[in-house]
Image (spheres, helix red, strand yellow):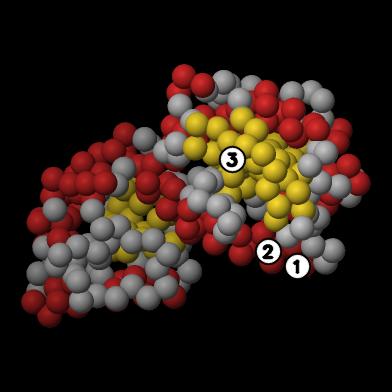
Amino acid sequence: MLRKVVFALRDGTGNRLQLSLCSLIHDLKQHGIEVAYAICLEDKVHMEQCGAACSEECLLRKYGSICAMEQEEPDTLYITDSSVQYRIWRQHGKYVLPYRHQWNQEDTFDGAEYIIESLEEVDHEVVDMAYRRLAGIPWEIFKTERCIVRETIVEDVDSLYEIYKEPAITEYMEDLYKDRDEEIAYIKDYRRRMYGFYGYGIWSILNRQDGKVIGRAGISWREEFDVPELGFVIGVPWQQQGYAYEVCSAILNYAWKDIGFKQIQALVMEHNEKSAALCRKLGFEDNGITVLENVRYILYKMQLNRADSKSTVV
């Protein structure tokens, strides 16, 4: 959980962007996130050379406590517009979010996964999401009445193997890697490639009552199509209890309202009547047979709009 944000902006940046910066700081504090200010290394050197130690007191009055660079700060995100400060903090294993603006275009932030380019577009949610992504903490997508839908993590792998060991599961979908280490490597890459780039993908479904992983569902893309695809699997012990409908209804609503998709499809292997029945119940329309790699699928499509939403997100 993000507890603190430390800003290290070069001398002059705070004054130029005072309104936007103060607005962000106020928003963070309003949501219980502590804010501190650290002096950039370049500015510290300059202050020592010029004897301008009073500038640090000014920052203390404006932004709160001064955070020493050497301090251990758990649950903390660091934001800086200095490439030097960025590299130092990264070398110390800190989670750093660089800030690029019109006065530091010459700076390079090598290895940065995310960069702020406009403070006006940043709030506590954006900051928290960036921290979670950098720290490897899975995003919780939403809750339904009985389930939690969140990003898949490597700790889910044993539960997934338990689900996929059932022949009824792999009869109509691709199995996991036989080698557990390969599956873990795939999950790590998937988190970076799908969640990190798109912000969505195939997620894990957890039972809210006991926290067990009971399946997977979400949104993905196939190279052969230009429409996003709904995918889902529920473990055999939890089938025929309405979990798939509950979660998939919420996913369709999320795809429309939060991602902005106007259309979605589902590919169901021919003769997989349970999945076909679920698609029809969700409101998908049969668009005939399509063949992929010599496998026949029923192509279902749906136009997304709020009126059609049957979501039970809570």
Query: In the rendered image of this protein, does residue 44 appear above or below residue 161?
Result: below
Foreground mark, 3 or 1, reads 3
Give the residue number, with chain letter if any, for mark 1: 182
Residue 102 appears in view:
yes
For label 3, the SS is: strand
Q: Which image quarter: residue 268?
A: top right
Q: CA distance from mark 3 to mark 1?
A: 29 Å
Q: CA distance from mark 2 to mark 3?
A: 25 Å
Instruction: Indicate which disc, 3 or 1, sits on the residue closer to the N terminus.
Output: 1
Query: In the rendered image of this protein, does residue 169 appear above or below residue 185?
Result: above
Query: Tag on residue 186?
Result: 2
> Is disc 2 surrounded by few (<14), some (14 to 19) or many (20+) residues within 10 Å?
some
Task: Tell me which amino acid carries mark 2.
Answer: Tyr
Q: Pick the residue in front: 229 or 294.
A: 294
Foreground mark, 2 or 3, reads 3
> Is disc 1 surrounded by few (<14), some (14 to 19) or many (20+) residues within 10 Å?
few
Q: Pick the residue in front: 21 or 107.
A: 107
> Is disc 3 surrounded by few (<14), some (14 to 19) or many (20+) residues within 10 Å?
many
Expressed as whole percent of the image width and height from the top left, the position of residue 6 reads: 33, 56
Residue at 81% over, 46% down: 172
**24 to the left or right of 73:** left
Q: Which image quarter: residue 193?
A: bottom right
For label 1, the SS is: helix
Give the residue number, with chain letter if any, for mark 3: 265
Residue 203 appears in view:
no
Expressed as whole percent of the image width and height from the top left, the position of residue 292 reads: 70, 56
